[in-house]
Image (cartoon, helix red, strand yellow):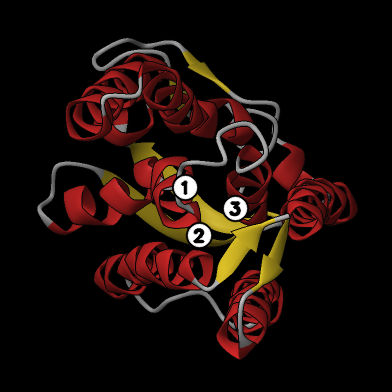
Amino acid sequence: MFLGHYGLAFGAKRIIPNASLGTLAFATQFLDELWPILLLFGVEQVRIVPGAMAGNPLVFTSYPYSHSLLMAIVWGALIAAVHYAAKRNARTACVIGLIVISHWFLDFPVHPADLPLWPGGSARVGLGLWNSIPITLFLELAFFGGGLLLYVRQTRARDRVGTWGLWSMVLALLLIFLSGYVSPPPPNERVLAWSALALWLFAPWSYWVDRHRERI
């Protein structure tokens, strides 16, 4: 899942309004932000197989440290601990930790049976909804649209940046998502990894947007 993770970040602002949208965007996509780094260092592996699934040409052969359930819990706990140490707000820190972990559960419906439960384990799970483009589009857009609606209903722009900064980010996310269905797959795994590092840009972008919006 891609857009759905950002939808959760938008929607979570309703639960913990004191947290920046940037923190929420970072947390919800942390596993995917970590993955290309591990891929570039050869710790995890992926193959590009056009037609492997209707909605995704990637075959994730090994990604136990970024996408196993156990490690998602570990990363969530670590990020929650760091946030608590910085902000001293236990409730917000716990929700942020759960948001990190939620990435695995949002991936579960769309991935084939390739999500590990723990590093070194043989069990792999996933419902494989990427095999249906209509269902994938519905899930992604429903999560994204629902979360965005919650965000815009509880915040308002302080200035023009708060308006066009938000909607330009929404447009960028939609274009990235939809381009995956009309563009050819990356030529190799290293290009894929370097491209995926662009996800890190959405955290500071979200911080910037959120600073120019206020709670209603």
Closest to the observer, 163 or 206: 163
- Residue 33 in picture, x, y percent from top left: 33, 53
Q: Is residue 49 left or right of residue 191?
A: right
Tell me the residue at 59%/53% (across/down). 6
Q: Three-letter amino acid code at disc 1?
A: Val
> Of all residues shown, which one is farthest toward the left?
41
Q: Three-letter amino acid code at disc 3?
A: Tyr
Q: Secondary structure at mark 3?
A: helix
Q: Which residue is mark 3?
A: 6
Q: Secondary structure at mark 1?
A: strand
Mark 1 surroundings within 10 Å by alpha-carbon count, few (fewer than 14), some (14 through 19), many (20 or more): some
Which image quadrant is residue 189 in?
bottom left
**C-alpha separation, residue under disc 2 versus residue under disc 1:** 7 Å
2 and 1 marks in contact (CB < 8 Å): yes
Residue 112 can be seen, yes or no? no
Q: Three-letter amino acid code at disc 2?
A: Val
- Residue 174 in picture, x, y percent from top left: 69, 73
Mark 2 surroundings within 10 Å by alpha-carbon count, few (fewer than 14), some (14 through 19), many (20 or more): few
Closest to the observer, 173 or 54: 173
Tell me the residue at 75%/39% (across/down). 129
Q: Secondary structure at mark 2?
A: strand
**C-alpha separation, residue under disc 1 versus residue under disc 3:** 23 Å
Q: Quadrant of the C terminus?
A: bottom right
Q: Which residue is mark 2?
A: 49
- Residue 204 in picture, x, y percent from top left: 36, 68
**C-alpha separation, residue under disc 3 versus residue under disc 2:** 26 Å
Tell me the residue at 27%/47% (across/down). 34
- Residue 162 in picture, x, y percent from top left: 60, 78
Residue 56 can be seen, yes or no? yes
Q: Which residue is mark 1?
A: 59
Tell me the residue at 62%/38% (across/down). 12
Q: Is residue 58 left or right of residue 180?
A: left
